[in-house]
Image: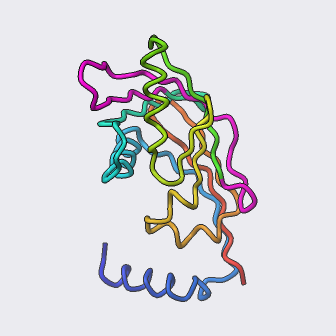
């Protein structure tokens, strides 16, 4: 990034964006499958879960398949079907709820996977067949955390090979 742009962004962050107070932004951001997978790999860095790799494959209609590769010997990659069950509601309930199910997995293997997921990173909670993603907790170590107080709406949708973020920001005056 240009040094001046970096300096300007740092200034805006340090002043809680007050120099552009009153701004409203609505954006639709299609994120490619490859970028989604790069972000997931980054989120898994330094965790102690038995998950060695994740391949997210978005499909039309707020659903995607996730291929999970575990570090356990002789365990093949697991294909998990995921659908968006509930969108986050900012600021009251900024949690994305996903429903998941395993394809072609035997019960014992599924039980071992579920038991191991108790060591998920902060901000990710497993509740039966629901996966709850706490957006503020997940964003806490990322630069985007400075924008969270300004999020009025955030929805996650999917199309073939893209996760689409619909976001509305409002910088208070």
Q: Quadrant of residue 83?
A: top right
Image side of residue 121 versus residue 131, left or right: left
Q: Give me the residue at 59% from left, 53% from top.
A: 134
Whether 77 is among the magenta residues is: yes
In this rendered view, identify the residue nearer to me: 36 or 116.
116
Residue 57: image x %, image y %?
Answer: 43, 30
Residue 60: image x %, image y %?
Answer: 56, 27
In this rendered view, identify the residue nearer to me: 65 or 3.
65
Q: How is the image coloured?
A: rainbow
Image side of residue 68 versus residue 82, left or right: left
Q: Give me the residue at 46% from left, 45% from top.
A: 120
Residue 80: image x %, image y %?
Answer: 48, 24
Which quadrant holds the N terminus?
A: bottom left
Q: Give me the residue at 72% from left, 84% from top.
A: 173
Q: How many callouts does the rendering have?
A: 0
Instruction: Look at the picture and state if 90 lies above or below 53.
Output: below
Instruction: Look at the picture and state if 157 lies above or below 44.
Output: above
The region drawn magenta spans 65-94
Residue 29: image x %, image y %?
Answer: 53, 51
Instruction: Look at the picture and state if 80 lies above or below 161.
Output: above
């Amino acid at each position: 990034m240009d040094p001046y742009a970096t300096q300007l962004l740092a200034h805006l962050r340090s002043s809680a964006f007050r120099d552009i107070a009153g701004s409203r932004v609505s954006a639709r951001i299609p994120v490619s499958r490859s970028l989604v997978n790069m972000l997931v790999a980054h989120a898994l860095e330094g965790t102690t879960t038995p998950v060695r790799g994740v391949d997210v494959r978005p499909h039309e209609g707020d659903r995607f398949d996730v291929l999970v590769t575990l570090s356990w010997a002789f365990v093949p990659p697991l294909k998990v079907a995921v659908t968006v069950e509930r969108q986050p509601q900012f600021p009251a309930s900024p949690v994305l709820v996903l429903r998941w199910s395993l394809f072609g997995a035997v019960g014992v293997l599924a039980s071992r996977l579920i038991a191991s997921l108790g060591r998920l990173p902060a901000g990710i909670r497993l509740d039966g067949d629901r996966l709850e993603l706490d957006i503020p907790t997940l964003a806490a170590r990322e630069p985007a955390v400075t924008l969270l107080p300004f999020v009025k709406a955030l929805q996650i949708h999917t199309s073939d090979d893209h996760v689409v973020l619909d976001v509305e920001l409002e910088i208070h005056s």
